[in-house]
Amino acid sequence: MKKVIKDIIRDIKRNIGRLDQTFLELLYPPRCVICDKVVSAGEAVCQPCRKKIHIAEEPVCMKCGKPLLDEMQEFCRDCGEKKHYFVQGKSLWIYEAEVKKSIYRFKYQNKREYAKGYAEEIAKQYGGWMQKKKIQAIVPIPLYKKKQKKRGYNQAQILAEELGRIWNLPVYTDLLVRIRDTKPQKMLSNTERKNNLKKAFKTTENIVQLKHILLVDDIYTTGSTLDAAAAVLLTAGAEEIYTCCIGIGKDS
């Protein structure tokens, strides 16, 4: 009964979110997620900006989706040296200058509306991949409670909700919880990143009924955060975890 009530509440929240989104679009016309200039309805990136960004396309690492320099390679250097808890990952764009600026505005300058554009671009690029993997639900990487309160929102959650809307999939925003206020991963070495994320996440309920989950975050670096979250979800009963991010670096 508790699960049924939770599902009903989740659906109500999603429908309210859709109405809010429609209202916001009437008040604020869509903007290019790269340059922030007004664009036509249904356009996430203006044509001039499309020339400035690069899709994370083949050849890419078979594990994390990081663009490779050599098309004969199967894995990037990171994935060749360590085990991941997720099955496979995909990212939308290479994390270069214009994409960095865009994601920074999305995370720190309240450009929440970018999530819709990011999600539309991801859906175009990876909709077929997602269907092949038989994804049943989407789970965003959570922020620590105090950090989210300070920022006002979790950018990964907003992106996940937009993907759920497009793909008509449930988004579990309260399934995974961050219970430690970890340091920013970009400031740490690989070893420090692993230690930083130990016991950082927990699940709030058993998820045996969910076999294939898509974990969503904004940026993929070494995958340590996604691995830590994936390990917890696997322990809770999931069978396969996949990942999806907006930006990713190139293989070095």
Image (tube, rainbow, N blue to C red):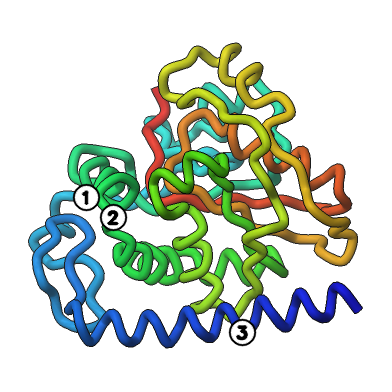
Q: Residue at x 60, y 12 (%)?
A: 191
| Residue that mark 1 sits on | 53
Q: Nearer the viewer, residue 180 or 118?
A: 180
Identity of the amino acid at label 2?
Asn
Residues marked 3 and 2 touching at CB (< 8 Å): no
Q: Is residue 151 above or below residue 115?
A: above
Q: Percent from the top left, x then y, of residue 153?
A: 43, 54
Mark nearer the N terminus (3 vs 1): 3
- Which quadrant does the N terminus fall into? bottom right
Mark nearer the N terminus (2 vs 1): 1
Q: Quick check: 184 left or right of 223? A: left
Q: Residue at x 57, y 64 (%)?
A: 129
Q: Is residue 221 above or below residue 174?
A: above
Q: Residue at x 49, y 34 (%)?
A: 72
**Disc number placed over residue 164 in the picture, else none:** none
Identity of the amino acid at label 1?
Ile
